[in-house]
Image (cartoon, grey):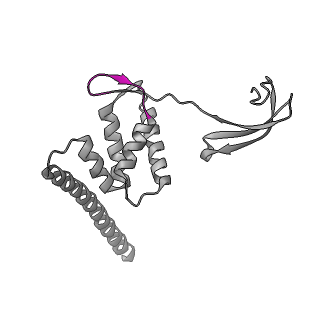
């Protein structure tokens, strides 16, 4: 690593530590020529898939666009910055795991909507209203009703599973009491 002070070609590493939750290595270096110290950060470079827009245009994935969209949807919601960062990382990992060189903007939107649905329902509806281009109040109502149906379905499944487990426990209890 070249020294930023004297531009000497060599430096030695004095200290190395993990940074950014293990996604970077922080190295403290000393120039062998002038003796000045400086810090470098080393991180991996992962190639994100290119985005195929609805008009057919192809462009590089833009982390900032995703961050801005999430931030707008989550504005004034009880979600911490750490939760937002974790969601951004999850979305990025999901996209990389697809193993595709190109991903449609529609697919990215669906992934973001699922992440927001899991994180905050109000933010989900906000994002969906723009993403799905809601034209009137009825579109909001339909989306919220659909969320209620999904939640009711989840609750129904949990209740059915709980009843089944209770029935099984009662049966086991009765069987164990038989001589």
Find residue 173 and report its image quarter.
Answer: bottom left
Does residue 110 belong to the magenta stretch? no
Residue 34 visible to an observer of this rendering:
yes
Dominant secondary structure, magenta:
loop
Q: Is residue 170 above or below residue 154?
A: below
Q: Position of residue 67 (x, y in %)?
A: 42, 43
| Residue 49 shown left or right of residue 105 in the figure | right
x then y, percent, for residue 52: 33, 26
Q: Quadrant of residue 27?
A: top right
Magenta residue span: 53-62
The structure residue drawn at horizontal position 50% and vertical position 53%, both measured from the top left corner, is 82
Q: Is residue 83 above or below residue 16?
A: below
For residue 94, say whether it is visible.
no
Residue 57 inside the magenta-drawn segment: yes
| Residue at position x 30%, y 62% in the image | 158
User: Quadrant of the image for the N terminus?
Assistant: top right
């Amino acid at each position: 690593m070249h020294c930023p002070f004297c531009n000497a070609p060599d430096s030695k590493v004095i200290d190395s530590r993990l940074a950014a939750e293990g996604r970077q290595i922080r190295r403290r270096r000393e120039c062998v020529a002038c003796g000045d110290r400086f810090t470098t950060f080393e991180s991996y470079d992962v190639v994100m898939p290119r985005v195929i827009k609805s008009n057919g245009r192809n462009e590089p994935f833009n982390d900032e666009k995703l961050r801005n969209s999430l931030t707008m949807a989550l504005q004034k919601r009880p979600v911490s910055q750490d939760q937002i960062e974790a969601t951004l990382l999850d979305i990025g990992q999901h996209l990389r795991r697809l193993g595709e060189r190109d991903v449609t903007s529609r697919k990215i939107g669906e992934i973001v909507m699922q992440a927001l649905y899991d994180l905050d329902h109000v933010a989900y509806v906000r994002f969906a209203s723009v993403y799905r281009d809601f034209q009137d109040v009825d579109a909001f109502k339909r989306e919220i009703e659909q969320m209620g149906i999904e939640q009711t379905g989840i609750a129904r499944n949990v209740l059915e599973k709980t009843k089944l487990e209770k029935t099984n426990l009662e049966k086991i209890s009765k069987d164990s009491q038989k001589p």
